[in-house]
Amino acid sequence: MAQLSKLLGLRIRELRKSKRLTQAQLAEAIGMETTNLCKLENGCQFPKEENIEKLAAFFNVAVKELFDFEHFQTAKDIQQDLIFAIKNATDKDLKMYYKLISAVREQV
């Protein structure tokens, strides 16, 4: 859960900053203490279900979008995911991966 809390905190901070809000402004808007929002953003505390729903509503996103962390992945994480996908791919999937990579490389 610690990793999930940290990633969710990063996502909340990212969304808050995209709206150019301070922690105090966001906390007030969703009816939360600023200290608790700070704990959420720092990954020290996981939000209650009701606060997850309040955050999603405030940012006008689906709840699942609060848990979109792929853009936080490191290059090493991505490489490991790709290696795993390739090693476990069917012949059909492997050919599709090759076509996708080849098409992208031609565009670069």
Image (cartoon, rainbow, N blue to C red):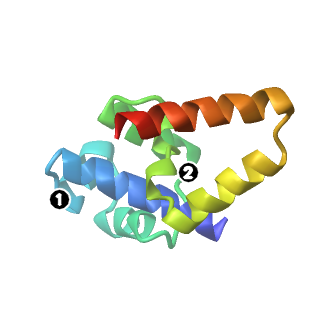
35 sits to left or right of 72: left
Q: Nearer the viewer, residue 33 or 64?
A: 64
Viewer-nearest of discs 1 and 2: 1
Q: Nearer the viewer, residue 23 or 50?
A: 23
Image quadrant in which you'd find residue 108 = top left
The image shows residue 27, relative to residue 68, as above or below, that is below
Q: For the residue labelled by badge 1, is the local secondary structure a helix, a strand or a loop? A: loop
Mark 1 vs 2: CB contact within 8 A = no
Q: Residue furthest front?
A: 106
Q: Nearer the viewer, residue 34 or 17?
A: 17
Residue under label 1, please give it: 22
Q: Position of residue 17 (x, y in %)?
A: 21, 53
Task: Please say whether residue 83 is visible from this viewpoint.
Answer: yes
Image point (16%, 52%), residue name: 21
Residue under label 2, please give it: 48
Residue density around tag 1, few if under 14, some if 14–19, many if 20 or more, within 10 Å: few
Q: For the residue labelled by badge 2, is the local secondary structure a helix, a strand or a loop? A: loop
73 sits to left or right of 92: left
Residue density around tag 2, few if under 14, some if 14–19, many if 20 or more, within 10 Å: few
The image shows residue 30, relative to residue 81, as above or below, that is above
Q: Quadrant of the N terminus?
A: bottom right
- Of marks 1 and 2, which one's residue comes earlier in the chain? 1
Name the amino acid, label 1. Thr
20 sits to left or right of 66: left
Image point (30%, 47%), residue name: 15
Name the amino acid, label 2. Lys
